[in-house]
């Protein structure tokens, strides 16, 4: 039984639980307040703060974990990234007062004071550039720090930038782009018992993520137009063609189509005389 640390609240938690559920690993809780849940026969989930997950994994309290890359980088612990899960997208950015002359990180000189809840990541970023900084370590509301004189600029997570604008700041330069990642203790990937389970989990999650950008399209097309239909519906290995019962002049064509190509594909199929076009989501798509 492998233990997976999952965020206990917020959007990361909701997205992670939905991903595991779609992959066939629904969280089975013993009560509404339980901090542990069963995830199928091979995995058990524990629910902790997202910021603590790198520590839990590195220290062996959990075997795997799901948390943001920003938190993994800040913790600086020895863990291995298994895969990018794609959700929880944000960026850790330098933000400065609107009137500041700072445009990029290259404009920042030694001695500047920076408010952030990511002191280690910030310190490493500027140390690599030979810039000595002072850190004002805050746990929240970084945006108000320059106004209060606590710091000259900030380094904070940004999604849309609206909060920065409200507080008289603007984004200067991102120092890290972050999404949720599946991480593990390195030694588990070398173990003959645990490594296959982790690879099976990765394959299951990848099949869900791969399917989200695809659609399954089915339609009846004139048999005489098959050569042209194959050009419109390349699919993964070409469309699947099935005879339509009692209709010698027609066949059914099935194919996987990129979501952003569905509109154009339907238009081209209709030009070829296709009928009964049906498009459905795909839950999982194995490579």
Image (cartoon, helix red, strand yellow):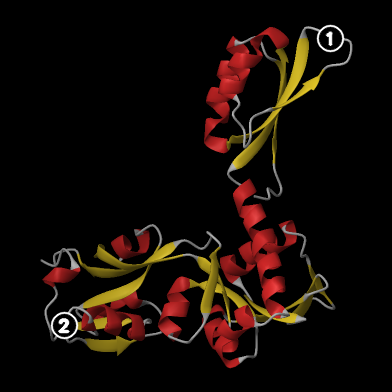
Mark 2 or mark 1: whose residue is earlier in sequence:
2
Dividing the image into 4 quarters, which one contains the N terminus?
A: bottom right
Residue 143 visible in the snapshot: no
41 or 242: nearer the viewer: 242
Q: Residue at x 72, y 59 (%)?
A: 23
Q: Is residue 11 left or right of residue 275?
A: left
- Where, by quadrant of the figure, is residue 243 drawn? top right
79 or 91: nearer the viewer: 79
Q: Is residue 165 left or right of residue 131?
A: right
Report, in whole angstroms, how far the alpha carbon at label 2 lies from the one at label 1.
Answer: 75 Å
Q: Position of residue 64 (x, y in %)?
A: 63, 78
Disc 1 designates what residue? 247
Q: Secondary structure at mark 1?
A: loop
262 or 144: nearer the viewer: 262
Disc 2 designates what residue? 130
Label ID, residue 58 = none
Residue 105 visible in the snapshot: yes
Q: Is residue 32 left or right of residue 143?
A: right
Q: Residue at x 56, y 17 (%)?
A: 268
Q: Residue at x 12, y 70 (%)?
A: 107
Q: Is residue 66 above or below residue 99?
A: below
Q: Is residue 195 left or right of residue 176?
A: right
Q: Position of residue 26 (x, y in %)?
A: 78, 65
- Where, by quadrant of the figure, is residue 156 drawn? bottom left
- Disc 2 packing (10 Å; few <14; some 14–19; many ≥20): few
């Amino acid at each position: 039984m492998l233990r997976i640390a999952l965020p206990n609240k917020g959007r990361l938690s909701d997205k992670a639980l939905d991903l595991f559920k779609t992959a066939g690993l629904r969280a089975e809780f013993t009560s509404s307040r339980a901090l542990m849940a069963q995830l199928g026969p091979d995995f058990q989930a524990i629910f902790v703060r997202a910021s603590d997950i790198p520590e839990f994994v590195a220290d062996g309290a959990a075997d795997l974990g799901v948390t943001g890359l920003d938190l993994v980088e800040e913790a600086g612990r020895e863990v291995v990234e298994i895969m990018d899960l794609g959700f929880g997208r944000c960026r850790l950015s330098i933000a400065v007062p609107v009137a500041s002359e700072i445009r990029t990180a290259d404009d920042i000189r030694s001695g500047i004071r920076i408010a952030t809840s990511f002191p280690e990541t910030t310190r490493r970023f500027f140390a690599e550039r030979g810039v000595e900084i002072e850190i004002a370590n805050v746990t929240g509301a970084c945006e108000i720090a320059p106004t209060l004189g606590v710091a000259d600029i900030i380094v904070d997570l940004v999604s849309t930038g609206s909060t920065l604008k409200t507080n008289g700041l603007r984004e200067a330069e991102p120092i890290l782009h972050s999404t949720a990642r599946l991480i593990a203790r390195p030694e588990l990937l070398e173990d003959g018992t645990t490594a296959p389970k982790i690879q099976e989990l990765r394959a299951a999650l990848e099949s869900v993520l791969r399917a989200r950008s695809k659609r399954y399209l089915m339609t009846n097309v004139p048999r005489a137009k098959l050569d042209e239909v194959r050009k419109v519906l390349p699919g993964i290995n070409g469309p699947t063609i099935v005879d339509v019962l009692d209709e010698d002049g027609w066949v059914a064509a099935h194919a996987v189509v990129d979501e952003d190509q569905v509109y154009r594909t339907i238009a081209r199929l209709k030009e070829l005389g296709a009928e009964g076009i049906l498009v459905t989501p795909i839950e999982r798509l194995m490579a």
